[in-house]
Each structure stands twice: as structure tokens, then as C-alpha cells.
Image: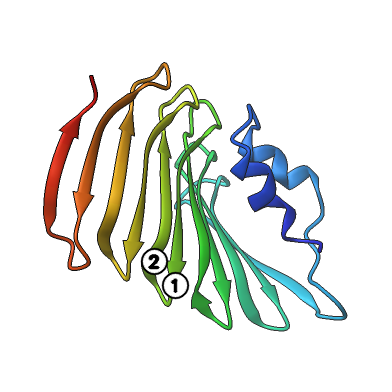
Amino acid sequence: MAGLFLPTLLLANSALMANEFWTRPYRCAGNATHSEQKETWPQTTKLKQVDHLCNGQIQHIFEYDRNGKLQRIKTFNGGKEQGWQYYVNTVTGTLMRKVMITNGRMHGPEESYYNTGELLLRGQYNYGVKVGTWQYFHKDGRLKKTLQYDSRGFLLKTTDAP
């Protein structure tokens, strides 16, 4: 499916430089017509935001910092923020955070990473509320601590790893 390869690449959190995405053409699925809207930072030619639309419906928004480096990717479905949202380290180009969005709210998995790409934390949201087990890791991959939340988001227990 054209246009949907970026999340697959970012999920691997390789040394991918996120800005390299723009070397590939963006296409809509099927016979949908692609269009894009670009916005630049005031008094510069550097990109601030690029919106990709298929048949007039927003599909992705790519946001850039003042230096023109990709910093966030939002995914939409049916005009609503829905799907993976990615945050990119603008210095290294590595993935810093990915979180699932449903109807504009965090719902589902989240993972955050150190600047070097190692996993920092892993957890789950239920419509904006932290639930279940959240794990925090050292840079070397060892478990640092675990937090346990109930279904309403109340912290039940904190366990430091040995």
C-alpha cells in the first residue's frame, strides 16, 4: 500500500533519518487523488507542516521544527486523528516516541526511546488514561522499574527492578 510504508520503517526504529521519507513519492491507495498543502515558517522558506490528502481527506500531517527537521507525524482516518503518531528527534532523526491515537485520544500502546534509539518505556492507554503495566528501561535494555495502573488510571504499585 503506497503511503503507508513510513510507519513500518519507523516501527523498526533503525538509524533511519526520518527526513529521507521525502525522497519517496507519496501515493494514495487505489484510484484516490493525492494532494498536499505546505506551510512554511514565517519569514523563511523552511517547511513548518505538510499535509497529505487523498480525495480531499487528510491522511498524514508532517510537522517540522524551525530548522526544517521532521519532528512529528500524525495519521488520520476519515478526517479524524487516528492511528500511530510519531515523534522524531530533530538532531539525530531517530524515533523518540510512538503512540496509538483513536478519535484524537491516546488509546493503545506507547513506546518511548532514548536519543540513541534504545527503548525507554512501554505502556498502554485506554482513551487517554494510563492502564495496566508500564515498564521503564535503562539505556542498556535492563528493566529499571514497573508501574501498575488500574482501569481508571490510578497508580496501584511501583516496583524497582533488582
In the rendered image, residue 73, in percent from the top left (x then y), is placed at: 53, 54
Amino acid residing under circle 2: His
The quarter of the picture where the N terminus appears is: bottom right
The answer to which image quadrant residue 12 occupies is top right
> Does residue 136 sit above or below 156 in this rendering?
above
Q: Nearer the viewer, residue 160 or 11?
A: 160
Q: In this view, does 98 lie above or below 50?
A: above
The amino acid beneath tag 1 is Thr
Q: Seen from this angle, which residue lies furthest top? A: 140
> What x and y, as percent, mark residue 99?
44, 54
Q: In this view, does 156 lie to the left or right of 102?
A: left
For residue 131, which quarter of the picture? bottom left
The numbered dot on residue 107 is 2
Please identify the quadrant where the C terminus is shown.
top left
Q: Distance between the residues labelled 1 and 2?
A: 6 Å
Which of the numbered marks, if any, corresponds to residue 102? 1
Q: Residue at x 59, y 35 (%)?
A: 13
Q: What element carries label 2?
A: strand
Instruction: Find residue 149 and report its horizontal and vertical position in percent.
Output: 20, 55
Q: Which residue is drawn at 41% across and 51% down?
A: 110
- Asked whether the beta carbons under mark 1 and mark 2 sit within 8 Å of each other, the answer is yes
Crowdedness of circle 2 by 10 Å Cα count: few (<14), some, many (20+)? many
